[in-house]
Image (spheres, rainbow, N blue to C red):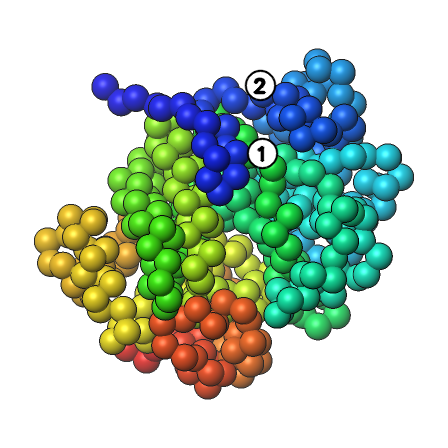
Amino acid sequence: MSVVLTGTWNYPTRILHGPGRIAELADACRALGIKRPLLVTDAGLKSAPITARARDVLVAAGMDAPIFADIKSNPVGANIDAGLAVYRAGGHDGVIAFGGGSGLDAGKAIAFMAGQTRPIWDFEDIGDWWTRADPAGIAPIVAVPTTAGTGSEVGRASVVLNEASHEKKIIFHPQMMPGIVISDPELTVGLPAHVTAATGMDALTHCFEAYCAPGFHPQAEGIALEGLRLIADYLPRACANGSDIEARSRMLAAASMGAAAFQKGLGAVHAISHPVGALYDTHHGLTNAIVLPYVMMHNRAAIAEKCARIARVLELADPGFDAVLAWVLALRKELGIPNTLQEIGVDAERAAEIGRFAEVDPSAGGNPIEVKAAALEQIFRACVSGRLDDA
């Protein structure tokens, strides 16, 4: 008989994990000193039953929690500005970041900007730009993920699209880490199979790229490996049966683990996916899922030893790169992930532009081998055409 375990974790922040723990939302707000929270989510969740359930918990506790949901699937600077105006006008003292990656990133960015005077782009993840922020002006955050993919609930950054430059910017500050996370698998039960697949592959990519990134960080590597094992065991189950609470629970844990692990670094998958999402408005997790094997092929020589270890953790018959690549391709096929970017409306007309943007994306620096614009453009073209050997 399967068992769903409940725990309270403090790495990398305090995580209340388990079915039904959304009932503790008001208590979580009080623990962070929040009396008048603003619940930030995306437009698709504004009227969803899970959002109403969360708000009912707050209202029952005497907290009037207005909802701000003017958030695009790839949040833009204007969304943050609009949410900030609502936050300040309402006299709020904290944010509940609720939803998938867009709701979580936007909520965190609004909380971060609550007491800042500089524009948000002044806090891009470049050098020590984060030190420009006034720490006292950062509002407390309770994060409530409703998908198991991005891991933004345990991240210290938000990805926001700068519409003027058509670039996704990573806004970073250590205090953007939510103070409390409520990780309730019951909130993910209604997620469609194709969204479960795309977000789950996002978590897989986080774990894989973090494990393969250069540098010494055994804690992150251990978390990444266990995250991959959980995803291998439970993502197919979560897609096949959306009501499988054990599978949903394990995938929420794996998503948080992926984001904790990528403190070590990411790589060319994210470096390419960010400009693709910015220019073509694609789903981030789905884009990562398509791009991953092509980047694996490009990095093959540099990640062979890492893949041998991954293969052993996954108990694959052949402990090597080919076995891991075959596993990724088979999992994508099982989950209905397309083979090419062309299948989701991305063409190669802007390939050179994608390459240039990808080279300066912060994720590129974590790739196991140095990648410049020409190589990233080549990988992108392979992702569009579907020719793995061209990557």
Asked whether residue 261 appears in the rendered view, the answer is yes
C-alpha span from label 1 to label 2: 14 Å
Residue 97, numbered label: none
Q: Amino acid at mark 2?
A: Ala
The residue labelled by disc 1 is 180
> From this viewpoint, which residue is outermost toward the right?
89
On the picture, is 237 further left or further right than 173? left
Circle 2: is it few (<14), some (14-19), or many (20+) Cα within 10 Å? some
Residue at 50% across / 33% down in the picture? 15
The residue labelled by disc 2 is 23
Name the residue nearer the viewer: 376 or 383: 376
> From this viewpoint, which residue is outermost toward the top?
60
Residue 312 spot, x, y in % from top left? 16, 52
Circle 1: is it few (<14), some (14-19), or many (20+) Cα within 10 Å? many
- Tell me where residue 227 sits by quadrant: top left
Name the residue nearer the viewer: 90 or 167: 90
Image quarter (top left, top right, bottom left or bottom right) of the C terminus: bottom left
> From this viewpoint, which residue is outermost toward the bottom?
374
Dot 1 or dot 2, earlier in sequence:
2
- Tell me where residue 255 sits by quadrant: top left
Q: Secondary structure at mark 2?
A: helix
Residue at 34% across / 58% down in the picture? 211
Residue at 53% across / 44% down in the picture? 154
Residue at 41% across / 52% down in the picture? 261
On the picture, is 50 further left or further right than 308? right
On the picture, is 66 further left or further right than 170? right
Image quarter (top left, top right, bottom left or bottom right) of the N terminus: top left
Name the residue nearer the viewer: 10 or 110: 10
The answer to whether residue 96 is above or below residue 325 is above
